């Protein structure tokens, strides 16, 4: 575990939007990588992206690490899955279930980061959208978006839902089923019509904004 903590510190990006972040460091580093970067790192003896993703999740789930260290690990995890190939590897690495489980964490900052990571993974990525639906992430995201007492958690849950349902009607249909009756559209909604989908999401955002903090 000491080695894992050492890795977390040495490989940290800037931890964004939590209590220890400063305005000057809240800048997202460039995510573009050359196609051969991982191969070069492997030749040099460094961990692969897959290994870093697994180490990040192990740190996030560790009972021995502080909240700040877990946020560092989550921030690294989010940056890794910005790459589509890494996001699509969440399934083969068995990381979807532990990621979704973090939506129920007692710490608001960890719930926020989990929603953020899901939104990143599924954005414009049909394979990840399918997996998020398969692992039943949508009910938890709807609950966070409408009921969480932390505003930042609600915002990230909205972001994740918006990314998950965009151009993916099966996810939209499940989301609608999870909404309270007053937010469900009265008539049939064409899930393939993004204007109609956006109208439903607008209602969800309005309801989310009314949640007491």
Image (cartoon, helix red, strand yellow):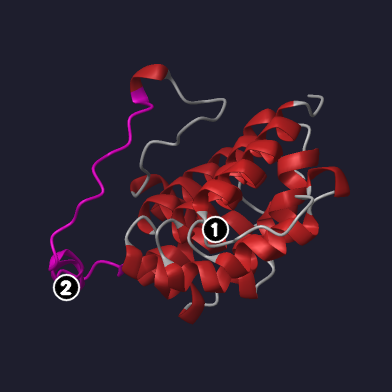
Magenta stretch: helix, strand or loop mostly: loop
Q: Which residues are magenta?
A: 25-49
The residue lying toward the viewer, choosing from 91 and 211, is 211
- The circle on residue 39 is 2
Q: Where in the figure is residue 19, as x and y percent of width and height?
A: 57, 25
Q: Where in the figure is residue 197, as x and y percent of width and height?
A: 59, 51
Quadrant for residue 208, please give it.
Answer: top right
| In the image: residue 172, left or right of residue 48 | right
Q: Is residue 89 above or below residue 73?
A: below
Camera-near label (2 vs 1) is 1
Q: Which class describes the residues within 10 Å of circle 1: few (<14), some (14-19), or many (20+)?
A: many
- The circle on residue 164 is 1
| In the image: residue 92, left or right of residue 209 | left
Q: Quadrant of the C terminus?
A: top right
What residue is at 85 percent from the left and 49 percent from the top? 180
Q: Which secondary structure, mark 2? A: helix
Q: Is residue 39 above or below residue 100?
A: below
């Amino acid at each position: 575990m000491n080695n894992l903590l050492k890795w977390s510190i040495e490989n940290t990006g800037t931890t964004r939007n939590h209590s220890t972040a400063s305005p000057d460091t809240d800048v997202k580093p460039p995510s573009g990588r050359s196609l051969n970067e991982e191969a070069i790192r492997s030749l040099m003896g460094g961990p692969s992206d897959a290994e870093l993703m697994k180490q990040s999740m192990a740190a996030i789930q560790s009972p021995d690490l502080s909240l700040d260290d877990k946020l560092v690990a989550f921030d690294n995890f989010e940056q890794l899955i910005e790459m589509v190939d890494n996001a699509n590897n969440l399934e083969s690495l068995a990381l979807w279930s532990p990621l979704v489980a973090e939506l129920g964490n007692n710490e608001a900052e960890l719930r926020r980061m989990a929603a953020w990571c899901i939104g990143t993974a599924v954005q414009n990525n049909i394979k990840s959208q399918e997996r998020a639906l398969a692992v039943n992430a949508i009910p938890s995201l709807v609950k966070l978006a409408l009921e969480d007492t932390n505003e930042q958690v609600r915002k990230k849950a909205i972001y994740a839902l918006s990314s998950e349902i965009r151009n993916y009607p099966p996810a939209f249909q499940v989301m609608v089923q999870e909404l309270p009756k007053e937010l469900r559209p009265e008539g049939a909604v064409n899930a393939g019509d993004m204007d109609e989908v956006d109208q439903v999401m607008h209602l969800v955002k309005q309801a989310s904004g009314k949640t007491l903090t």
